Image (spheres, rainbow, N blue to C red):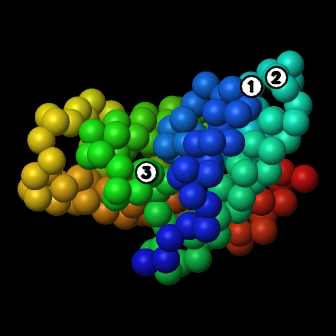
């Protein structure tokens, strides 16, 4: 599996400088939900949602926008590649399990919000398995770390991330059928 070029840390720092209200994980989940929900205006709406009103410090907004465009490009490329190399934007393994678990819950929360923003008729086009994936994502939003960093906790975390990764690709493919990467990215310009 090849990781995204964009780093969680780089995205987090850019969002913080721009005073964005969303963290990197929730921001990426929101994007993925919008893309999976067949929102033709996802790129532009996502940037507006994340960066908020124009009144923020413009230089930081521009820097953050550049970082977000990299996140968008990487995400679309990996979802459309057909190579199963999509990876959710989450903290590195060297971060505390509690931090990673919270980011994972935030990622799923962002995904569900983004997916839900596409409208009611989208869910009606999903298979039973894909609907179960959405339900499981909802459960992950309530994920809390018990403070214990055992091998089994790490294994559980890794299993959830892998389930989430595959689930996103499945939903994307069911609803979008894998558009060309340029189609989605072009809508930004």
Mark 2 and mark 3 lie on one chain; the one further toward the N terminus is 2
**Residue drawn where x is 41% and y is 57% of the image:** 92
Q: Label 1 near label 3: C-beta < 8 Å?
A: no
Q: Nearer the viewer, mark 2 or mark 1?
A: 2
Q: Which mark is residue 130?
A: none
Q: Residue tagged by mark 2?
A: 56
- Determine whether the residue tagged by mark 2 lies in a helix, strand or loop: loop
Please give the name of the residue rendered at 69% of the width and 26% of the height, measured from the top-left corner.
Answer: 19
Binning the other alpha carbons within 10 Å of mark 3 as few (below 14), some (14 to 19) or many (20 upward) gives many
CA–CA distance between discs 2 and 3? 26 Å
> Gap in Å between the C-alphas at discs 2 and 1?
8 Å
Q: Which residue does the numbered mark 3 point to in the structure image?
A: 91
Q: Position of residue 13 (x, y in %)?
A: 63, 42
Mark 3 vs mark 1, CA separation in Å? 24 Å
Location of residue 11 with respect to 58 vertically, above or below: below
Secondary structure at badge 1 equals loop
Q: Residue 93, how many percent across, how many down?
A: 34, 58
Taking 122 as reference, is 101 left or right?
left
The residue indicated by pointer 1 is 52
Q: Residue 138: in sight, yes or no? A: no
Q: Residues within 10 Å of mark 2 (few under 14, many from 20)?
A: few
Q: Residue at x 71, y 69 (%)?
A: 181
Q: Residue at x 72, y 51 (%)?
A: 67
Camera-near label (3 vs 1) is: 3
Left or right: residue 174 compared with residue 131: right
């Amino acid at each position: 599996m090849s990781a995204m070029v964009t780093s969680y840390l780089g995205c987090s720092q850019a969002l913080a400088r721009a005073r964005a209200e969303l963290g990197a994980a929730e921001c990426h989940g929101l994007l993925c939900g919008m893309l999976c929900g067949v929102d033709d205006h996802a790129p532009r709406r996502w940037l507006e949602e994340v960066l908020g009103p124009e009144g923020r410090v413009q230089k930081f907004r521009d820097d953050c926008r550049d970082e977000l465009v990299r996140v968008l490009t990487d995400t679309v490329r990996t979802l459309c590649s057909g190579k199963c190399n999509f990876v959710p934007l989450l903290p590195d393994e060297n971060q505390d399990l509690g931090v990673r678990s919270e980011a994972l819950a935030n990622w799923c929360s962002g995904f569900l919000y983004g997916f839900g923003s596409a409208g009611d008729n989208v869910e009606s086009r999903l298979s039973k398995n894909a609907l179960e994936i959405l339900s499981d994502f909802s459960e992950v939003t309530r994920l809390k770390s018990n403070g214990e960093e055992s091998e089994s906790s790490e294994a559980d975390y890794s299993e959830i991330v892998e389930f989430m990764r595959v689930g996103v690709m499945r939903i994307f493919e069911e609803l979008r059928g894998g558009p060309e990467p340029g189609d989605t990215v072009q809508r930004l310009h």
